[in-house]
Image: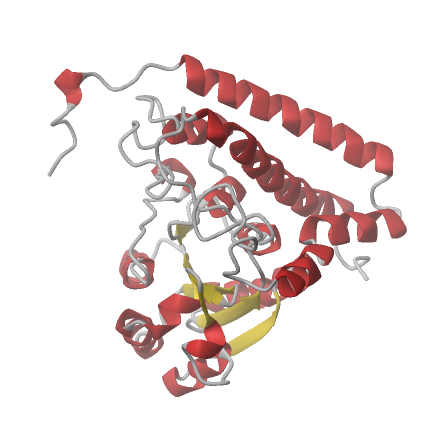
Amino acid sequence: MTGRINKETLTALFRTMLRIRLFEDRVVSLYPDQEMKCPVHLCIGQEAIAAGVCIHLRKEDYIFSTHRSHGHCIAKGMGLRPLAAELYGRSNGCSRGRGGSMHLADPENGIPGTTAIVGGCIPIAVGAALSARMKKNGRIAVAFFGDGAAEEGTFHEGLNYASLRKLPVIFVCENNFYATNSPLKARQPEVNIADKAAGHGMPGVWGDGNDVMFVHDACKEAVERARAGGGPTLLEFRTYRWKGHVGPDSDIETGCRPAAEYEEWVRRCPVEMFGKRLMKEAVLSQGDIDRLTVSIGAEIDDAMEFARRSPFPQQSEMLDHVY
């Protein structure tokens, strides 16, 4: 039941999930126009994790993400205009048109920058948490990464050091069971990724990443622990991306993933499940959801029009911000 959480928080969770879904749906519909030149890695189907985690974070807290970062950035507060402009490669994009979908940045909202290197955000988040500890500024850091990153050395090195120093960092594994097209069972033994936390002396929690209330509660405890000086937590949320590894199309037709598996997860749509739950418990009505959908749609219309009308970087700027 959702009664222990106020209506404003529940509505905010649903609004964030719906905002991520509708934005990415729009990217899917516009990408074939070939005006967006950068690759796009979409998180459709995984919206509950970004929403359930970021609702606990302050503006000044840090998040570090991957090539699949649109949802995390939206949930953390990045505006849709600079995000859309970056996808279109325009100079007023969040990375001034130089980063594209995989390299988003919004330092004012606690997003120093995302990275496409698998596992690359983990040590950076640990470093940010160490900085916060040394400066005593009360900030915490969150690293979002996929199941494939749990096979990288930086995963174990990052967890080890964070635990050793009791750093205020939360490791969030979005386990969608595939690294590109390689299934988890072909790469790792039958062990929960969260169980690897025990070897590094920290709590490990795993569960349904499509249930935003589970994500919310698990992250709430981890955030409270980090802020109180109790050290890091490893959270493993199991979910599923509806689209292929990269691009607006599904890879089901090519046989990369079983159709029955895909259909089972689509039936467990996190946005639809939470919307129905809120209507059942009289938190929102269908009319409320319809109005939210229209409002968010208008915001996305504005963002995409802003992006298309924005200028490209000039040739004279080519060497600016290059180090």
Q: Above or below — where is 151 with respect to 281?
A: below
Q: Residue furthest front?
A: 254
**Residue 81 horizontal/vertical position (percent):** 47, 25
User: In this orientation, which residue lies closer to the viewer: 66 or 40?
Assistant: 40
User: In this orientation, which residue lies closer to the viewer: 11 or 121?
Assistant: 121
At 52% from the left edge and 33% from the top edge, which residue is drawn?
27
Q: Above or below — where is 136 with respect to 182?
A: above
Which part of the image, by quadrant, shows the C terminus? top left
Relative placement, left or right, of 137 versus 84 is left
Q: Which picture quadrant has residue 181?
A: bottom left
At 29% from the left edge and 36% from the top edge, which residue is drawn?
99
At 69% from the left edge and 45% from the top edge, which residue is drawn?
14
Q: Which picture quadrant has residue 26?
A: top right
**Residue 197 horizontal/vertical position (percent):** 44, 80
**Residue 243 horizontal/vertical position (percent):** 54, 49
Which part of the image, by quadrant, shows the N terminus? bottom right
Q: Is residue 76 visible?
A: yes
Relative placement, left or right, of 252 versus 1 is left
Q: Above or below — where is 224 with respect to 98?
A: below
